[in-house]
Amino acid sequence: MFVMLNRLALEMTAEEFKHSILVFKQKLYRLGLRLLNDEEEAADVVQDVFVKLWNMREQLIQYRSVEALAMTMTRNVCLDRLKTPHRMVRLGHQSDLQQEASNPELAYELGETTAIIADSIRLLPQQQQLVMHLRDVEHFEFEEIASITGMNLNHIRVNLSRARKAVRERLVKHHNYAYQGN
Amino acid sequence: MHIREIERLLEKFYNGETSLQEEALLREWFASAEIPSHLASLKAQFAPDLVKSKAELPDEAFDEAFFQLIDQHEKTHKAYSLRKMIYAGLGLAASLAIMLSIYLEFKPRTIEDTFNDPALAYEEVQRAMLFVSSKLNKGMEPVRQGTASFNAGMEKASDFNKMSLIKNYFKIE
């Protein structure tokens, strides 16, 4: 009887966990993908983060935003993985991906301007990439971005401004080129 | 919305100073049909899903795999703690056995009084003494026999004294 009750309680929390925590999976995955540029590894990181969150599920109530916490953990796990020597080998793989994205034929398939933006974001310094991703792709508040990245608000704005201007520059250049071409 | 207002918001946007609401407004405006040509090149930057990766995790399959992983973790954890408990129990039993044997080996041996009544104790001692003496007597018997035959032998050997008597007799001669 006790075992049955125990099981029931466990299933309840699992259900709650699924509905309140696992729903962040796509956001975490996109962040992982942005930082690691590797679908398999990003998925692995997301699972890793969820296991950690599951193990601390009793303490989660203390956090103001579990979503921001999950994003912070994802960022940390990704940065850790970027540091490992095993990763250095994979970096070569990443530059292959970049070349693929710069490939004009593929760019055409993706939609030209989207590909240009994706490409210009990928060429940004990591901090600018991260801030831009969190703001312009995921629409986080600045306070949340601060807690996820550990940067102060001013630093975030500066990085965001540079990133947005860099993307604009690429877009305008492309636009002018297209006009001249016509 | 007035184009001036949009241009002001755009400037804020590129300085990283717009709020989420203002950014939503800009996206909305760029999604509308008529965009002045000098701003047309920027349209892509305000796409509703700015380079949101098309790659997605499989929703249900991911959750299922996750809970399977959790189950597995918890099972191995349980097995691990059970094994630890068995080891701890074995260790405890072993140390108890060692302590017990050390105690038995080195415990001070005191002779305890087994009788409360002195008269009874005396009787018991007497009985024990009698038993000892009876055994002693029985044990003395072969000794007595041995000495008897030894004495007999010695008697015969005393004949040699006679020989020395004779010798003396002749010496005197």
Image: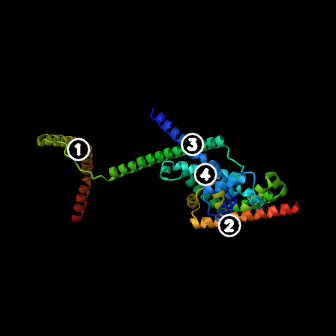
Checking the image for residue A19, the label placed there is 3
Residue drawn at 57 percent across, 42 percent down: A19
**Chain on which label 3 sits:** A
For badge 1, the amino acid type reads Leu
Disc 4, disc 1: CB below 8 Å? no
Residue drawn at 44 percent across, 46 percent down: B89
Checking the image for residue A162, the label placed there is 2
CA distance separating discs 2 and 1: 117 Å
The residue wearing badge 4 is A48
- Counting from the top left corner in percent of width and height, residue A57 is at 51, 48
**Neighbour class for label 4 at 10 Å: few (<14), some, many (≥20)?**
some
For badge 4, the amino acid type reads Asp
| Nearer to me, B110 or A54 | A54
Q: How many marks?
A: 4
Give the secondary structure at mark 2.
Answer: helix
For badge 3, the amino acid type reads His
Checking the image for residue B136, the label placed there is 1
**Chain on which label 1 sits:** B
**Are discs 3 and 2 located on one and the same chain?**
yes
